[in-house]
Amino acid sequence: MLTKQRADRVLLHNISWEQFENILTNLGETRGSRVAYCDGTLEISNPVLAHEYYKEVISCAIQDFADVLETDYESLGSTTWRKQLKMAGLEPDNCFYFQNESLIRGQLEYDLNQDPPPDLALEINLTSKSLGCFSIYARLGVPEIWSYEDGKITIYLLENHDYQVSENSLALPKISVDKMMELIEENRPLGRRAIRRAIRDYARSM
């Protein structure tokens, strides 16, 4: 097992699926680290403060927008999604069901062998990652990713097993992610409640 370490992450090689499952069990659910696994390589990362801020504020904006538009959704945070057949697994910064929300409504356990993957995954990219998460998401069949980097959200849609940049979201087709980020940054000095009010007012104007 070869190990590469940085201050914010550990990269492990030659990890079997059984070892991956055991590591998840040993790490437990009450932790701040995130894991990603692909073909025997496991990355364990620890998010920084700014990462957590944008994860929370963007997640709240998505939920506020859906609430105002009366769009049913489920938010499942950093649930560990994995599929042994694909030798892939990861924990998003947040994930949501929109189109398939009715199929998983009220569930407390999920199995990608029979349940649909999340409709939307959120990735906050403030530090470089050694293990590319897009290929893992593609193996799991997640149709849409919102990737935040350098103050901007880019929407990616899964097409023919690869992600392509899109101007519009499938999960929330009415939203402008550029406008959403503009409101977040304008109101950031005023606090979280001001941001949420601005997002809700924007959604009502749609």
Image: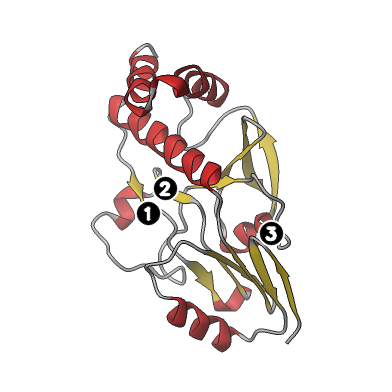
Q: Is residue 13 above or below residue 121?
A: below
The amino acid sitting under disc 3 is Ser
Residue situated in front as seen by the camera: 20 or 204: 20
Provide the secondary structure element on which disc 1 rests.
Answer: loop
As drawn, 181 above or below 33: above
Name the residue rendered at 47%, 40% in the picture.
Answer: 53
Please give the residue where the numbered disc 1 appears in the rendered image. Answer: 76
Residue 96's label in the rendered image is: 2
Identify the image quadrant of residue 200. Answer: top left
Label 1 close to label 2 by CB (< 8 Å): yes
**In percent of the image, x 63 and y 27: which residue is there?**
167
- Which circle's residue, 1 or 3, is located before the other in the chain? 1
Label 1 packing within 10 angstroms: few (<14), some (14-19), many (20+): some
Q: Earlier in the sequence, mark 2 or mark 3?
A: 2
Q: Which mark is residue 26?
A: none
Q: Nearer the viewer, residue 107 or 14?
A: 14
Picture quarter with the N terminus: bottom right
User: What amino acid type should be assigned to the residue bearing mark 2?
Assistant: Phe
Q: For this rendering, which residue is in front, 156 or 202?
A: 202
Crowding at mark 2 (Cα within 10 Å: few <14, some 14-19, many 20+): many
Q: Looking at the image, is 119 positioned above or below residue 195?
A: below
Could you tell me which secondary element the residue under label 3 belongs to? helix
Q: CA distance from mark 1 to mark 3?
A: 21 Å
SS at badge 2: strand
Q: Nearer the viewer, residue 32 or 40?
A: 32
Amino acid type assigned to the residue bearing label 1 in the image: Leu
Residue at image position (48%, 19%) is: 183
Residue named by callout 3: 135
Image quarter in which the C terminus is found: top left
**At x 33% / y 15%, what residue is drawn?**
204
Q: First in sequence, mark 1 or 2: give its number.
A: 1
Picture coordinates of residue 137, whole percent (x, y): 60, 58
